[in-house]
Amino acid sequence: PVDRRSPLIDRGLRERAAGAFVGRHRHVVNIRADGIAVVLGPLLRDVRIVAAALVDVDSGMVLDAWSAAATDTSTDLELIGAQHAEIVRTALALLHSWPAGGGAPGTCEVVLGADHGARHLLRTVPDPLGDRLVLAVVVNGSQRVLDRVRKRLEAVSVDALTAGPSMT
């Protein structure tokens, strides 16, 4: 019998590729072509950084992600990204309803963590297209390590995170 598959697709390629990539289907001009690992490069060299992701808050879609454990399949960055988006949506709604919520509207920072465990630092990022984005960084370490990571993230240019490929 004739195998009705495209001659360009190797058997098993779909199964191998399915777990290797993170979907980034959004605006062409909103995501860096070279990835979040280039923008956060010096920060990601720290062994205490477990993962980082840029997530669309409204859809929960991971736009770009990096993980220290590239071969670990137990960590689903898409699921964690969606959970991070839900937390930020809830935090923004709470801050919007709070009568004396200082700071710029639509911005927040959330830190989740347990004693002696991973800490999730979630920080909103202004999007040039008007959507809501969050930069999530997972850190293993103490509060002091988290404070150091927070300070280093302040030095990261927002334009560098959201700059997409040039159209020229």
Image: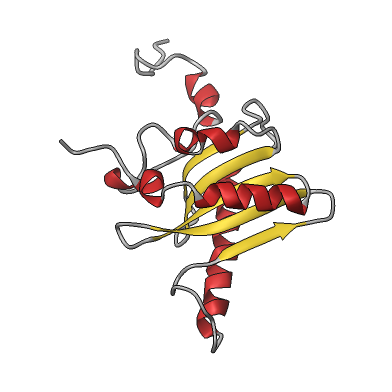
In the depicted structure, whether residue 82 falls above or below residue 77: below
Percent x, y of residue 128: 31, 57
Q: Is residue 138 left or right of residue 41?
A: right
Q: Residue furthest top?
A: 1
Q: Residue furthest left?
A: 168
Image quadrant where residue 15 sits: top right
- Number of numbered callouts drawn: 0
The reply to whether residue 127 is in sight is yes
* Residue 58 x, y percent position in the rendering: 45, 62
The colour scheme used here is secondary structure
Q: Can the viewer see residue 80?
A: no
The residue shown at (66%, 32%) is 73
Measured along the vertical axis of the image, is residue 87 above or below residue 35? below
Q: Residue at x 47, y 46 (%)?
A: 156
Identify the image quadrant of the C terminus: top left
Q: x, y percentage for residue 86? A: 57, 63
Indicate whether 66 appears above or below 143: above
Q: Nearer the viewer, residue 60 or 38?
A: 38
Q: At 43% from the left edge and 35% from the top edge, which residue is drawn?
A: 35
Left or right: residue 105 compared with residue 19: left
Q: Give the percent coordinates (x, y) of residue 64.
A: 47, 41
Q: Which residue is located at x 56 percent, y 85 percent?
A: 98
Q: Nearer the viewer, residue 79 or 27?
A: 27
Query: Could you say which is closer to the camera, residue 21 or residue 28?
Result: 28
Q: Quadrant of residue 16?
A: top right
Q: Quadrant of the N terminus?
A: top left
